[in-house]
Amino acid sequence: MFKSPAGMNDILPREARSFQDIYAKAGALFELYGYEPIETPILEDVSLFNRSLGQETEIVQKQMFVVERQDESYCLRPEATASVARAYLENSLDKTSGFIKLYYTGPMFRAERPQKGRLRQFHHIGAEAIGSESPLLDSETIALADGILQALKITGYTIKLNSLGCGDDRKKLKTLLLSQLKSKLDKLCPDCNARYGRNVFRILDCKNEECGRIASRLDFGHSDYLCEGCLAHFKAVRENLDALSVSYTVVLTLVRGLDYYSRSVFEITHPGLGAQDAIGAGGRYDRLISELGGPDLGAVGFALGVERIILASGPQPQASGKKTEVFIVTLGEKARRQGFILLNGLREAGISSEMDYENKSLKGQMRQANDRGVKYASILGEDELKKGSVTLKDMGSGKQEEISLDAFTEEIKRRICCVPTPAVN
């Protein structure tokens, strides 16, 4: 028996309904905020992520699924921001659109050890706004992420906010971290000792308890590394969020481990998710477009994890699709063929309907109708065919009546869709 790869789960119908519900509600808010949909390939050139995420990041070092084909080297996308930035430049949107807001949904891939909230194939809903350095855009992006979670009835989450500043500020912060952590290397875990020389920012979001305690006791403030412009930008972001009544907590040790981040960064965490407690994250990446060969443009975005949203939702009724209204019960081959025609007529009228495809008995078909919770069962047998009628059973009251075959679809429309019957002159 074949099995799906570890950490790459099947999404069965009931959970798929939840995914669709999340996509629909998020999509409605994206459109409300002026974002347009974009889809990028699942496969991208490896060098895109080597360059944008940083050679020393854990994603590039350990987590990319690389696909080699002759002299070509691709990888399954580990995140979507770099892909959207690449599409923005490749399709000359900087020349034709300039400032643009884009949103996406879809699978991402990272070769991690599968555990709760961390899969090798996972799904993101995300947004990227490219072409502005305004702090209003940072605030709007965070408010949008907050609005999506509220629309999905997620509660108990925390928005953590920080600023990494510009490129020069980030270098100052790196120097501060290296200086303050140097004397504590013997207390840090082996992974953080390796991160110290490779990517010191990653130490700040290590899940090891002792490393977390050390990070929380580091002694510095925003004025120690942010320039005047970045201090003013961060102040404006916070004031805008306050004006919108978006709750957040400033966390000085919050960093994003990817090289392209600058200025505002944020993370949304939920206590119900365990060690992998981030529902989503994002921030500003003003250097990325120019680093990929484009103009010097500001940009900001975020992504929310669909699987983690579902986990944070807790035990709730699964989202359901369109309810089946009519089940057509048939007895005999002629009735089955006629029932199939009736079924098509109902569907053309926009009425969700179904019939038996397993040659079940009358009792078995009625059980199917009952299990589906349909409003009506339409029974068609030899007697009905001779009379040119259908026996319609109201599954709620149990009442049965005969309806003409020719008037069947219109009568069902009238009863289900409240379409009034035309007056007879």
Image (cartoon, rainbow, N blue to C red):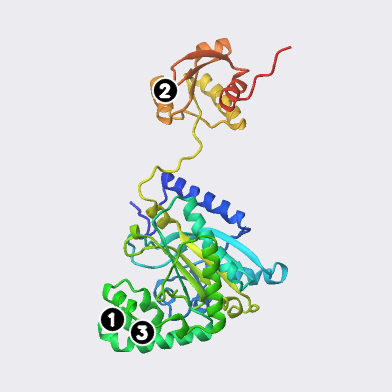
Q: Count the marks.
A: 3
Of 322 and 268, the residue lying toward us: 268
Residue type marked 2:
Met
Residue type marked 1:
Leu
Mark pair 3, 2: CA separation? 68 Å
Q: Which residue is mark 3?
A: 196
Based on the displayed image, in which of its 4 quarters is residue 178 positioned?
A: bottom left
Direction from residue 392 to residue 216 in the image, left or right: left
Nearest to the eye among marks 3 and 2: give it. 3
Characterize the local packing of mark 3: few (<14), some (14-19) or many (20 or more) Cα atoms within 10 angstroms: some
Label 3 element class: helix
Kindly identify the residue that appears in the image at 28 percent across and 79 percent down: 189
Label 1 element class: loop
Asked if the residue at tag 1 contacts the one at tag 3, i.e. Cβ–Cβ closer than 8 Å, the answer is yes
Characterize the local packing of mark 1: few (<14), some (14-19) or many (20 or more) Cα atoms within 10 angstroms: many
Q: Earlier in the sequence, mark 1 or mark 2?
A: 1
* Residue 280 locus on image (x, y percent): 45, 63
Q: Earlier in the sequence, mark 3 or mark 1?
A: 1
Asked if the residue at tag 2 contacts the one at tag 1, i.e. Cβ–Cβ closer than 8 Å, the answer is no
Q: Which residue is mark 2?
A: 366
| Disc ID at residue 188 | 1
Residue type marked 3:
Tyr
